[in-house]
Amino acid sequence: MSDYNMQYDESEAIKFIRQYMPEGISERYSDDEILNILDMIWDYYEDNGLLEIPSSYEQDDASPELGKILDYVNKMLAKDKLAAVDKDDVRFIVEGELAYEKSIGLED
């Protein structure tokens, strides 16, 4: 097992995502709302066998996944009647999460 999970910190991810988001959007959402989307992203990874990253992994390999992750998260949000994240803002959270993963070296 790799040490990826030891480097990942949800609190730091949320801070990173808040800084990544355009001005005026970050304050619309609570940490719990962002965390809910992070959980959905990791559920997507688990459902699609993406938690174990092969050593031949290249960051460019993940690019096509963005659309699939967005589709998955938006589908899950549609089912979650308590979710209050605007569909247009989901992209910033997902992209911020992917940027956070890259920043801590999850793609290595």
Image (cartoon, rainbow, N blue to C red):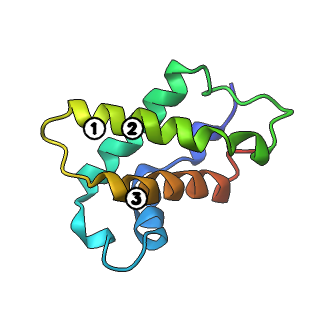
The correct choice, above or below, for 1 with respect to 95 in the image is above
Badge 3: residue crowd in 10 Å (few <14, some 14–19, many ≥20): many
Find residue 105 and report its horizontal and vertical position in percent: 70, 51
| Mark toward the viewer: 2 or 3 | 2
**10 Å crowding of disc 1: few (<14), some (14-19), many (20+):** many
Identity of the residue drawn at 22% across and 59% down: 30
- Residue 13 shows in this picture: yes
Farthest residue, direction bottom: 23
Which image quadrant for residue 66? top right
Q: In terms of depth relative to the viewer, which is nearer, 88 or 33?
A: 88
Q: Where's the C terminus, which quadrant?
A: top right
Pick whichever of labels 2 and 3 is earlier in the sequence: 3
Tag 2, which secondary structure? helix
Mark 2 and mark 3: Cα distance apart in space: 17 Å
> Is residue 108 at least partly visible in the picture?
no
Badge 1 marks a residue whose secondary structure is: helix
User: Which quadrant holds the N terminus?
Assistant: top right
Q: Splitting the image into 4 quarters, where does residue 64 fall? A: top right
Mark nearer the viewer, 3 or 1? 1
> Mark 3 highlights which residue?
14
Q: Amino acid at mark 2?
A: Val
Residue 62 in the figure: left or right of residue 40: right
The answer to whether the residue labelled 3 contacts the one labelled 1, judged by CB atoms less than 8 Å apart, is no
Query: How far from the left and from the top, in percent, is residue 45?
Result: 54, 29
Q: Are marks 2 and 1 in contact (CB under 8 Å)?
A: yes
Return the residue at label 1: 77
**Which disc number belongs to residue 73?**
2
Which amino acid type is marked by label 3?
Ile
Viewer-proximal residue among 17 and 66:
66
- 65, above or below 26, in the image: above
